[in-house]
Image (cartoon, grey):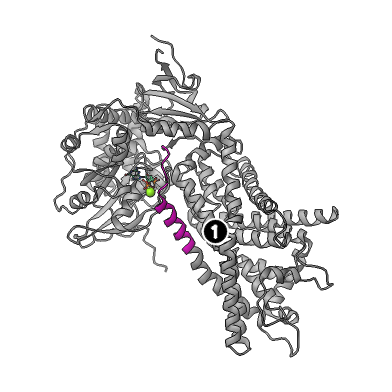
Amino acid sequence: MAATIPLSALPVGRTAVLRSYPTAGAAFLRFREMGLLPGTTVTLVRTAPLGDPLEIQVRGYRLTLRRSEAEAIVVEPAAS
Amino acid sequence: MTSPVLPFPAPAPAASGRTPVYALVGNPNCGKSTLFNALTGLKQKVGNYPGVTVEKKIGTVYSQHGQPMQVIDLPGAYSLAARSPDEAVTRDVLLGRRSDTAQPDRILCIVDATNLERNLYLVHQILDLGRPVILVLNMMDLATQAGLQIRVAKLEKELGIPVIPCEAAHGRGLIELKVAMSRPDLPLPRHRWDIPSPIAPAVSELQASLVENDRKAPLSARAEALLLLTDQDTIRVAGSTPLSGRTAEILRSWQKRWEGEGTDWAATLVSSRYDAITRLCADLVERDDRPSNASSTSDRIDGVVTHPMWGWLVLGGIMALLFLSIFTLAEYPMNWIDGHIASLADLVKESMSPGDLRDLITDGAIGGVGGVLVFLPQILILFFFIGLLESTGYMARAAFIMDRLMSRVGLNGKSFIPLLSSYACAIPGIMATRTIEDSKDRLVTILVAPLMSCSARLPVYLLMIAAIVPGDQVPILTKVGLMLLMYALGTFGAFGFAWLFKRTLLKGVPPLMIMELPPYRLPRLRDVVLQMVERGGLFLRRAGTIILGISIVLWFLSTYPKAPEGASSQEQMAHSFAGKAGRILEPAIKPLGFDWQIGIGIIASFAAREVFVSTMGVVFNAQSEDDEDTAPLRQALAAAKWPDGSRLFTPLTCLSLMVFYVFAMQCISTIAIVRRETNSWRWPLFQLAYMTGTAWLLSLVVFQGGRLLGF
Ligand SMILES: Nc1nc2c(ncn2[C@@H]2O[C@H](COP(=O)(O)OP(=O)(O)OP(=O)(O)O)[C@@H](O)[C@H]2O)c(=O)[nH]1
Ligand SMILES: [Mg+2]
């Protein structure tokens, strides 16, 4: 079992597999609907100039999310 | 006895059954409006960021045989479980919940072919609706560029519906699409999706209850039942009857049971749809491994535009360039228009005998409208620039880099897009707040949007700047600097008040910032120019209607009642209705450095800000003693005096006046739109009060402070 980290801790440019959301899920429903599901591969593309929000690549498109949400999303970095 | 008003009129009979009504549905920014324009020849706004369209728009498309069909362009949505007001429009039109729109009987689903999986999620929900669907694979050019090959025939077979590849932006695939649209026998989609077993019994129970107790059509009841499980909003959506007690009870008891079992029903539903989509896509898309250079170009641009240092310089540079070009590029066309208006007025003067009618035409109509018309070039430049920003994809980046700053005042980057649009006009800006999910954030953004200096203030600023720094010897940068100062003042004002409102009146949780960043696209010049011409036309129409009307009314109000024979024109003005109104206001505005004549302009501006310029044209030109030549307004202003003979438009007064116009809420159309978007009079009236109050206070500070400092 590889180590998991919050998405916010993923280094820029690295790819990871999404593992889980917090259980109280209403706020994260939209992320799911946009294709970020457990098992989906995400890449952290960059952060905004002031460090927040983050830009990720998922299913071939670019999405922004705030650090505060990214902290709650658990990912497993792919072996590099 | 008053007769009760029926809240929900019976649905209109399906339009003669012969004209099919198509709804255009798809994710944001997939090209719906581009396709709509190509089909109908209309000019819906198109732009390269999610959330351009926020309201439905109906158009007519003719089949190859000239048979008319209706199409409805809708706001983009990622899901039928709407999270923001614009998505709710789409959901409500599709489900027939809006009393002003007949439920569309067929659906045109548009997907971005470069991004099938996510786009198909909405399609998957739409297939549940039990209506004929045509699937349009748009942006095929980009898909090919990215090395994607989509097996269209297989997709058609799997879904059982027509699938049409097309490039809306280049008009390719339209004929095939029209042929499919005019088929009388469009098949219903074949649906091969099994609702996950822990949830299936609940869906059938809800479905039955919706048909029985909520009078939903059996065909769409399944979709409605599924939606109840993911849309937190379903129970209190605007324009729909509340859920019947029985259905609500079923929903509650199932939710309780799932909570007990630890089943996340909404997440299960979403995952199961994506599982179905993944299976569908598995051998649908073939990818050659050629690296796509479109996305790497976008990345290179973003490397600069969102760079910690370059990013800010780019943003600042764009703004500076905008204002610089307003001053430099507009000069020649402006002089040209100015010259023609003056010679038109002179022509009328020569060919008519002196009298009230001649004065009405030259001073009222030509002077008033002409004073505003000369600013058309500047306004076109402003719209052209904003159009460029919108069509390249920069808007979404601006929101991305501004999000952190916006979060300081309690909003999010998405609010930045409506605020930027408000530089053109607050009305589309306020409409654009529909993309904001949180209702309090949306309200705060609506409240502060009119503080962003709109194009109607531009004439006022330009006139005042011309009065402050007369002549051409001053460097252009001084003028640009003054202008930037006014825009900055409005912008900081907007942020300041947003901060205040989020802290006091409308406290809320920090919002999310879920936003798609589209790849950059070369702006289509046609779209940008069309948009600019459209908005320029609107400005001309305003000049020809509201402003003409007000100028004429104002001319009457300032000409009658007539002063005794032999009075000077200044005395006449003072004697008139307008003069009296100005005098009543004068005590309130004298501390700001304004006299009663400026007061007339301020009163008239409450209809629309540009009217200030035309009013000054009527008020001061009417007084120019020399009747042979129409002096430019600037010179008339320079000659204006207080009764004691001191200059009226001193630099300090001009500055104070500009500050007043930065903050005052003077636009009837904005008030009307705020009333519509917030559904009450409370907020527009509050806005009128707080903005105008601030305007008065800050002008006071500027004028009195300036005097103390010895200006
Ligand atoms: N390359 C390419 N670009 C396209 C095509 N169709 C649309 N576009 C571009 O895609 C962008 C979005 O187009 P819109 O028509 O505004 O998209 P929309 O779906 O109406 O967007 P919203 O109203 O925000 O939901 C614009 O920049 C269009 O020029 C196409 O077939 N090929
Ligand atoms: Mg659109």
> Magenta includes B526?
yes
x, y percent for residue B74: 35, 50
x, y percent for residue B121: 30, 35
Q: Quadrant of residue B312?
A: top right
Q: Identify which residue is drawn at 24% across, 40% down.
A: B127
Residue B652 falls left or right of residue B663: right
Amino acid at pointer 1: Ile
Screen quadrant of the N terminus of chain B: bottom left
Secondary structure under tag 1 reads: helix
Residue extending farthest to the left is: B185
Question: Ligand 1 sits in which quadrant?
Answer: top left
x, y percent for residue A7: 46, 21
Residue A21 falls left or right of residue B680: left
Residue nearest the viewer, comparing B2 with A66: A66
Residue that badge 1 annotates = B379
Span colored in magenta: B519-537
Q: Quadrant of residue B409?
A: top right
x, y percent for residue B595: 75, 68
